[in-house]
Amino acid sequence: MREVREELALTVSEVPTVLDTASTTLEGKRDTLTIVQATPVSASFALSPEIAEARWVHADMAAMPEGEPVSRWLERALSARART
């Protein structure tokens, strides 16, 4: 969970559950994105310079406000969570 700690200054209370993995070639590099479910110690977080935006959302797409922009990664994460 090094990335969570470095990018958002979040600490999680237990080992995260891996929900899904995806390969991406965005930004001209090959990356593996691992989608996890975890419980943070606190709801507060701080963005690193590499992160443009972060926010807490409901764990259900039906709860998203109509017309709210949603990234494909969020859609994939919530879809993976619904399958567990």
Image (cartoon, rainbow, N blue to C red):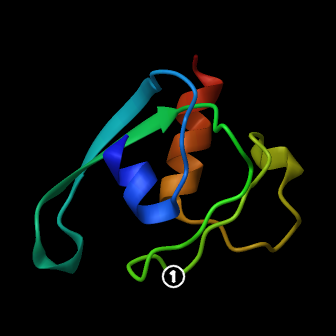
Residue 31 image-quadrant placement = bottom left
Q: Quadrant of the N terminus?
A: top left
Residue 71 image-quadrant placement = bottom right
**Which residue lies under the disc numbered 1?**
52
Q: Amino acid at mark 1?
A: Ala
Tell me how many marks there are.
Answer: 1
- For image coordinates 11% across by 61% down, the residue present is 30
- For image coordinates 39% across by 32% down, the residue present is 20
Q: Residue 46, percent across and down?
A: 59, 69
Q: Kindly give the residue lying farthest to the top in the view shown.
A: 84
- For image coordinates 33% across by 46% down, the residue present is 2
Q: Quadrant of the C terminus?
A: top right
Q: Residue 21, percent across and down?
A: 31, 37
Q: Residue 25, percent across and down?
A: 17, 66
- For image coordinates 80% across by 47% down, the residue present is 58
Q: Is residue 49 above or below residue 10?
A: below
Q: Secondary structure at mark 1?
A: loop
Q: Is residue 79 left or right of residue 56?
A: left
Depth check: 73 or 50 in front? 50
For label 1, the crowd category at 10 Å Cα-Cα, with few meaning under 14, some 14 to 19 and many 20 or more, is few
Q: Is residue 12 left or right of residue 5?
A: right
Q: Is residue 57 left or right of residue 45?
A: right
Q: Residue 77, percent across and down?
A: 53, 42
Q: Kindly give the residue lying farthest to the left in the view shown.
A: 29
Q: Is residue 26 above or below residue 11?
A: below
